[in-house]
Amino acid sequence: MSKRTSIIQFCTGVGPMFSGYLQAAAYNNLDGVSGRAGWRWLFIIDGIISLPLAIAVVFFLPDVPGVQEPGLIFTPKEIELARTRAPQETKLHITYKWKDIVVWFRTWHIYGFCILFTAMCLSSNISSAIPFWFKSYKDFTVAQVNVYSTPVYAVQIITNVFTAYISDNVCRGRRWIIIAVVSIINFPIYLALTLLPVHPANRGGRWALYYLLGLASCKAAQTWTWVNEALLGQPVKRAFVSTMMNAFSYAFLAWVPILAFPTKHQPYVTKGNIMATVLTVFTAFFTLGMAYVQNLRKTTGFFQSVFVENESENESETDFVAVNSADEKREHRDLESNLK
């Protein structure tokens, strides 16, 4: 699961990295062409790239295994394999029901994952200073500022791939370990960026610290993996919690960075750096708290983390215990062998 989720985070690193090179190329080669500035050409190029992808998503984005049909993308055997991994996710209703939402808000998942994800998103804004830092030296060209800002995404890509493997194999699916450990690693980096001079005598040190900010991105992949696994078998609740995670984080990202990392003060944003440092420590401890709650394995109440199969009379979505029998595991391995 972590490897698959990290593919998305991998792309979120490749996109901005490629964008930096595209901006440099547009500025160097298209600035002034047909009377348009280089940044205007960049918008045109982005539109040309985005439109076909948006159309492709409509036709090729797969559905959940329970309702997916064989076609050009998936064979019947592949769909059957996906269904054995989540056999309970077969009954789906399209809209959220108020009675379900009320029940969901009585469990810790919405609060825990929303707070955790928002804290991570807000602390990651510390990297917004990178292009402004290069620009503040006055001896870098516009193209150099764009290109020199991209290695942080290379660090992000490598970290996501590495931690995905570690999470699935070494940590055996305990996603909280990666989130907590990386948050602890982030702390001295954030603290150094807060305390050290913005323009030190040897700028190489701060330069390296900025690139190391890319380590933090793997926490998002692990969080999305965690929420998907924690709510496996409850597709509607999982969709709702995921939506709330995005909505809650955007509600704060819309205004907090304006106050903590104002553009007019970049790269001198000490208040924002302090906030990011505090939040990364909070993330580490909050993650450990969530792991503790999950490991209580309660079946009822606010701290419920083990779901017993129990279809309600009101056709609410089905909950389940995430334990496969020996026969199910054997069937799963047989299907994988057939696919190979």
Image (tube, rainbow, N blue to C red):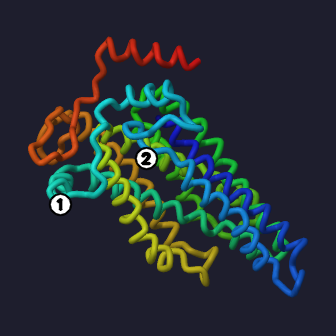
Vertical arrangement, residue 72 with respect to residue 111, above or below: above
Residue 199 on image: x %, y %: 71, 70
The residue at the point 44 percent across, 74 percent down is 256
Q: Quadrant of residue 172?
A: top left
Amino acid on which disc 2 is placed:
Trp
Res 179 label: none
Vertical arrangement, residue 109 with respect to residue 26, above or below: above
Identify the mark nearer the N-term, 1 or 2: 1
The residue at the point 58 percent across, 58 percent down is 192
Which residue corresponds to mark 1?
98
Which residue corresponds to mark 2?
224
Q: With 322 as the anchor, is 249 left or right in this view? A: right
Q: Which structural element holds mark 1?
A: helix
Vertical arrangement, residue 312 with respect to residue 94, above or below: above
Residue 73 on image: x %, y %: 58, 38
Residue 239 makes an appearance in the image = yes
Q: Which structural element holds mark 2?
A: helix
CA gap, disc 1 and disc 2: 24 Å
Quadrant in which the C terminus appears: top right
Q: With 143 as the anchor, is 302 left or right in this view? A: left
